[in-house]
Amino acid sequence: MPAASTDGASGAGSAALGVHSTFVLSATSRTFVCQLQDCFAALAKHLSAAVEFSGQIGALRVLARALERAGGLLHEAGVKRELSAALGKVVPGVLQLVQAAIADADRVQALPQALMFLSSALTVLPASFKQHKTLEGNLKQVLVSQHCTAQAKVLAGRCLGKLPGCMGTAQAWSEMCHASLCSAHTLLDCALMGMETPDGLIHDRAFISQNTVPLFPLATEGQVHSAQDLGLAVQQLAATLSCLQQLLTHHMALAVPVPARALLGLACRMLAFQGSVSQQGKKQLAALISQLLKRAAVTQHDGDQPQADASLQVYETAGQLLTAGGIGVAGMLAPAVLECVLREVYDQSPVSQQASPPGQKLSGKKRKKRAADDIPTLGLAMAALDSIPSPSAQLASLARQAAVLQLLQRLLMVGGYITVQTGLAC
């Protein structure tokens, strides 16, 4: 009998939830705004009364739809006031659900949906969160919890990144940003387990104050004793990066001081160690260098020294990229390198002027015209003298030829077969 009564209550709750969902989706805007507080209050009551996780998740989804629709009506008079009052009735119940999930590992199923709703509410109307200190404490407890999932931690980090919007001050934003940067570096110390060069580590931390307090209590490198601790550190790092992303992309009503150098240092530290990311970056860099090679291989008769120096730098950079990228990059750069060799060494473009087909004879008029053109004249001689490059231009040309031949040698060493096939195709 108790099971039957529970099933009956669950069925009645699902039916009521369906009615509210239909109202949110189909009611006119005027009716929806007039009954906004009643709708949110009923959904909050359903959320607190739901025993099963499916009922809690269903109520949170309907609340999210109602919040999304109300957010689209904020430009109308009175909607912001009504929504702020409605959220005041709902948010305490959602926070209780979050606290229950933190305390009991068996009640974490609805936690991701609850954090999604809080994230949406922080986006639509951050000023309505009067209890933002309580919310901040709960979110940090999610990050340090062993039984909360990785998805829940990332969502908690996203909410933390939106919290400065509740306070509306540049100081709150700056403190959250520096705390996130400090946490990210400390978590990297734990996750990478000392497999970095100390010089790079000092450089990456150079723009973070030593007095900065991290977002939450963190384990240092020496306190990691198991794979579980390492896994928790990786999950917390993902959540911290999610917080930083929200800080940089979430709208603030005032200007904030972005620590660009500290952010760049963190990005460089991660990219220097993460091989899969750097391999993808090498492909993009190879495409860029290929375009620069085609622009650099231009015959220079005026001895433009800055342009010659730029060409030398491009050839040197391409050689370094070949060494770092291997045969995959060689296949992308081979056509551009061969074009540079043709232009710099042989002073011709890859598509040279085609000669007359073998065996084809010139007519009498064409033979006479060619013979007349071959007779040297004073004007042609003077033009030839003017076209002789200056000594500085000759030295610049020789330097470019030497550099491009060294680049060709590097290409042949890294991907000789690809180079031969590309040359035959040309």
Image: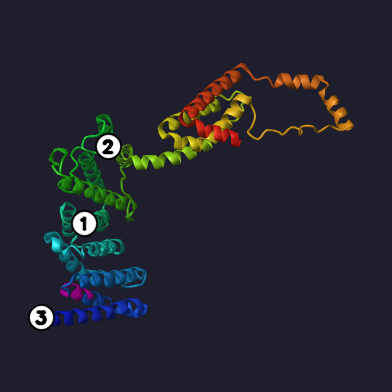
Taking 423 as reference, is 248 left or right?
left
Q: Secondary structure at mark 1?
A: loop
Span of residues in magenta: 43-49
Q: Amino acid at mark 2?
A: Phe
Residue 263: give x, y in percent of width and height: 31, 42
Q: Quadrant of the C terminus?
A: top right
Comparing 52 with 17, the one in front is 52
Which residue is disc 2 drawn over? 207
Viewer-nearest of discs 3 and 2: 3
Q: Quadrant of residue 190?
A: top left
Q: Would you say residue 309 is visible in this rendering?
A: no
User: Which secondary structure class fits the magenta region best?
Assistant: helix
What's under tag 3, amino acid-wise? Answer: Pro
Q: Is residue 206 above or below residue 112?
A: above
Q: Residue at x 15, y 62 (%)?
A: 101
- Confirm or deny contact between disc 1 and disc 3 (CB under 8 A): no
Circle 2 SS class? loop
Q: CA distance from mark 1 to mark 3?
A: 33 Å
